[in-house]
Image (cartoon, rainbow, N blue to C red):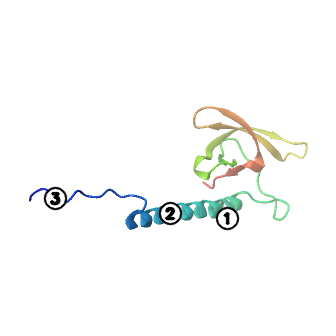
Amino acid sequence: MGPPASIPQPYTHDHPLAYTLRQRWTLVQQIQLHFWQRWQKEYLQNLQTRKKWQRPDRNLAVDDLVIIKEPTPPLTWSTARVVKLYPGEDNVVRVADVKLTNGKTLKRPVVKLCPLPL
């Protein structure tokens, strides 16, 4: 096999294959974004029950594993373990201290904590 008859042309933005690859990459990004939006709206909302419309749920307990809901992409949300609870006058927990995997402890409202079913 000898040397090529011509110099191969690099893929440029004008090349049809490059255009197709860009379209596919854009489509993959849109599908990923759609998946995480649905996961947040459907699955995560089911974990975070609304006591006003449903029967009362149990309070968080120490050592519960939770996801901390934050205004960032879902893949960056942290998991944590509940270490301390702050119940109100009615014995309903509204604030909790959670310990992240890196050892840092944060105080978060219960509405931003989604307990994981174990």
Give 27 or 31, whichever is nearer the viewer: 27
Residue 113 vs 7, above or below: the answer is above
Nearer the N terminus, badge 3 or badge 2? 3
Q: Does label 3 or label 1 sit earlier along the sequence?
A: 3
Identify the image quadrant of residue 78. Answer: top right
In the picture of the structure, the residue carrying the numbered disc 3 is 4
Q: Which amino acid does label 3 sit on?
A: Pro
Q: What residue is rendered at 13% in x and 56% in y?
A: 3
Give the residue at mark 2: 28
Q: Where is residue 114 in the image (x, y as percent from the top left)?
A: 69, 52
The amino acid beneath tag 2 is: Val
Q: In this view, does 75 lie to the left or right of 107?
A: left
Residue 72 is situated, as x and y percent measured from the top left of the image, at: 65, 48
Q: Residue 47 occupies which quadrant of the picture? A: bottom right
User: Which residue is rendered at x = 67% and y = 65% of the image?
Assistant: 42
In the visual, does 17 lie left or right of 58?
left
What is the spatial separation of the Cα atoms under label 3 and label 2, in whole angstroms?
35 Å
Q: Is residue 69 found left or right of 31 in the rendered image?
A: right
Q: Residue furthest left?
A: 1
**Disc 3 packing (10 Å; few <14; some 14–19; many ≥20):** few
